[in-house]
Amino acid sequence: MNGRGNGLADTAPDNGQTILVAGGAGYIGCVLVPKLVERGYKVRLLDRMYFGEQGLDSVRDKIEMVVADVRDIPEDALDGVDGVINLSGLSNDPTAEFDPEANWQMNAVATETLGQMCVKRGIERYVFASSCSLYDGLPPGMHDETAPIEPRAAYATSKRYGEEALLKLAGEGLTPVLLRNGTVYGYSPRMRFDLVVNTFVKDALLTGKLMLHGGGWMWRPLVDVRDVSDAMIAAYEAPAEKVRGEIFNVLHSNYQIRELAMLVAGSVQLTGRSVTLDEVPAPALTRDYECSNAKLSTTLGFIPRHSVLDAVTDLVGRLDGSTASQLTDPRNYNIRWLELLNELKPSLETFPSVL
Ligand SMILES: NC(=O)c1ccc[n+]([C@@H]2O[C@H](COP(=O)([O-])OP(=O)(O)OC[C@H]3O[C@@H](n4cnc5c(N)ncnc54)[C@H](O)[C@@H]3O)[C@@H](O)[C@H]2O)c1
């Protein structure tokens, strides 16, 4: 075991490497990039900056920034790059449904194109942020990476296309590693309050009411943003023969939504506030699935270590005292922010980066 306690080696094997992190200014990227810098990597970040760059303040002078779109990657963005971590694109169902064509171009086509650019340049390692939402729609029960998935929604379909395209490139010299992340929770300098645990913490602090849609019986795999970031680093650094063309689920545990609500309510009640759980009808579309994290631990020895309770305690400590306008800032809700930007410009094809 090491200092981090999750199986990731304390030091990087070769810390002179340059990693291109596409989509690195987002929720996960703003936790991952400082970790890469701390590990001695040179980071070149490529991002459209939809949500701004303020989440990168702590490393701004230590990284290279390329403000560009993954649908049109400048050739020289890959100059001197040793490997790629791709976090870019639309990152949830509502935004993918909001503009399915832009979602397809970003999450499916651009993922493949970036892979082809890597092959052309002899860049081998490509870690791709896929999603456990690919398991939605399967019969109830625990699913591993071999499950016969049949994604239907725009977001999951585009992620699956990206996975398959990269797997094909494994025959051409690429070492793609596909991480199917559970729903992420915890603090990032670029917060998202549209993810279930973070939403509950925000609601508990803001209104003292947590909504349980359809009773909250749905299952969901969950993982802390620090663990997802470390898993990406572990996938980047693992020997190629262990990970080439492999898919790994990345999650701490599976929870029912009502269990999450009770954990959050309990933590926030400790600060002296009252929090109630309100049952409301389920929306037309709900997501319900459970996944196994065994392959990541048996293959790479990587075990996510931050529980929901850890992260909620940390979040409550950080957010207690935040003003209502901080907690409701539309920039922290992907679909609200993209809708607002779209009111300024007609489509995701044309709206400007937000600096
Ligand atoms: N957060 C989660 O719960 C979760 C779960 C599973 C998978 N993932 C995947 O992990 C990745 C990162 O998620 P996140 O929560 O950090 O999302 P995020 O929305 O916070 O970050 C995405 C980043 O990509 C950038 N981006 C979007 N479209 C782009 C484009 N066309 N060109 C260049 N940059 C672009 C955005 O500006 C943003 O900085 C995504 O691919 C997402 O699908 C996230």
Image (spheres, rainbow, N blue to C red):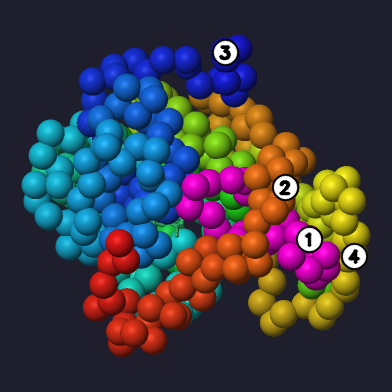
Give me the disc on residue 2: 3
Give me the disc on residue 316: 2
Part of the protein shown in magenta:
185-212
Which image quadrant is residue 83 in? top left
Residue on which the image places disc 4: 276
Distance between mark 1 and mark 3 Cα atoms: 35 Å
What is the quadrant of the C terminus in the image? Answer: bottom left
In the rendered view, would you say 7 is above or below 100?
Answer: above
Which of the four quarters of the rendered structure image does ligand 1 lie in?
Answer: bottom left
* Category of crowding for the residue at label 2, using alpha-carbon neighbours closer than 10 angstroms: few (below 14), some (14–19), many (at least 20): many
Instruction: Pick whichever of labels 1 and 4 is earlier in the sequence.
Output: 1
Distance between mark 1 and mark 4 Cα atoms: 8 Å
Instruction: Pick whichever of labels 4 and 2 is earlier in the sequence.
Output: 4
- Which percent across, then down, holds residue 330? 52, 71
Cβ–Cβ under 8 Å for marks 1 and 3:
no
- Which percent across, then down, holds residue 331? 48, 66
Which image quadrant is residue 38 in? top left
Q: Mark 1 or mark 3, which is nearer to you?
A: 1
Tally of marks: 4
| Ligand 1 closer than 8 Å to label 1 CB | no
The residue at the far top in this view is 1
In the rendered view, would you say 64 is above or below 296?
Answer: below
What is the quadrant of the N terminus in the image? Answer: top right
Q: Mark 4 or mark 2, which is nearer to you?
A: 2
Residue at image x 65%, y 45%?
318
Residue at image x 57%, y 53%?
132
Amino acid type at image mark 3: Asn
Amino acid type at image mark 2: Val
In the rendered view, would you say 189 is above or below 83?
Answer: below
Distance between mark 3 and mark 4 Cα atoms: 40 Å
| Ligand 1 closer than 8 Å to label 4 CB | no
Amino acid type at image mark 1: Ala
